[in-house]
Amino acid sequence: MRHSLLLLCAFLGGCASRPPLPLRVPAEEAAWFKFPASLDASEQVVVPATVAAAIQFAMEDFRPRDTKPHRGSDPVEACLYQRQSFDVEATPSVEDIVLVRFSLSPGACIEEGPVMDMGSTYAVDPRRERIVAVQPGTPPAEAASFTFPMELPLQGLIHIDGNTAAAIQLALDHFLPWEAPPSRQPACLDRRDSYDVTAAPGPEGVVLVQLVVDDQRCPPDPSESVEATSGKPLQEVVLYAVDIRTQRLLSIGRRFQRHP
């Protein structure tokens, strides 16, 4: 299977040394959960592969998963260290650049008055796997190569609430660990900009995250599983259920579907 080596690598935890892989909910506690037949179309957010990769690169810089609050931090400061405290907006820009904006989620980290928004805007080139500029924060000499617009372009703009954005990052961090070595599968399957992402709320504080290969980045291999009636390759779907309250992976599954 296309992802079997990647998933085995992630399950065993031997492919990444920093940051550690996301924690799993013990099997006996997760037994109640069953994946639905499909994600709720009315509440799902669909993130194209290049945009999902750009968000992941930006998030790892903005709030690395292994970052901890400093000793003696108060509840508000501790809250500001959490990925789920920040909504995400992302949109394609010029020359394959994707703009990613992190902003404090409404109602997050409030204690005895409003908290200053600690957000940032990133210009990311997911094809070259690099951050081009950050606002604020990029030194003037480096910032000259890119000029941020006054507002994010509306065309293609995607808004993701903080809980859903954090769940997506947990799933992607587990699916493609940052320090994983190249697998024996096609090189495109090791790239973060090869997977379209769909996320939707699930039951009881669960966020469902679905990963599907972008066929334009990785054309299907005719030797893979095929549909009995048409003889065409089936599309593999990897599913994650994330317990957003504890920031742990509840369940991981796979299924196959027809290519669109």
Image (spheres, rainbow, N blue to C red):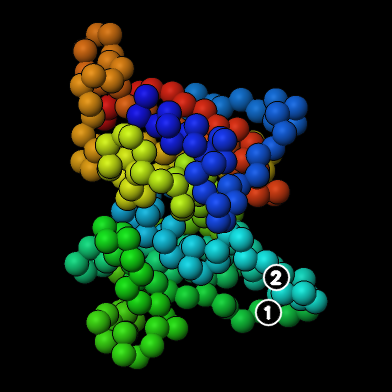
Identify the residue position indicated by label 2 in the image. 69
Q: Position of residue 257 (x, y in %)?
A: 35, 23
Q: Residue at x 57, y 56 (%)?
A: 19
Question: How far apart are the two marked residues, 2 and 1, measured between alpha carbons?
Answer: 20 Å
Identify the residue position indicated by label 1 in the image. 114
Can residue 172 be seen at all in this image of the molecule? no
Whether residue 143 is situated above or below residue 241 in the rendered picture? below
Work out whether residue 134 or residue 152 is closer to the camera in this orientation and state it.
Answer: 134
Assign a secondary structure to mark 1: loop
| The quarter of the displayed image where residue 6 is located | top left
Q: Residue at x 48, y 34 (%)?
A: 7
Can residue 56 be seen at all in this image of the molecule? yes
Q: Position of residue 4 (x, y in %)?
A: 43, 28
Q: Position of residue 25 (x, y in %)?
A: 69, 37
7 on left or right of 146: right
Q: Residue at x 39, y 53 (%)?
A: 52
Amino acid bearing label 2:
Pro
Whether residue 165 is situated above or below residue 76 in the rendered picture? above
Amino acid bearing label 1:
Pro
- Residue extending furthest toward the bottom: 140
- Mark 2 vs mark 1, foreground winner is 2
Where's the C terminus, which quadrant? top left
Assign a secondary structure to mark 2: loop
Work out whether residue 43 or residue 33 is closer to the camera in this orientation and state it.
Answer: 33
Q: Position of residue 223 (x, y in %)?
A: 23, 19
Whether residue 3 is situated above or below residue 22 in the rendered picture? above
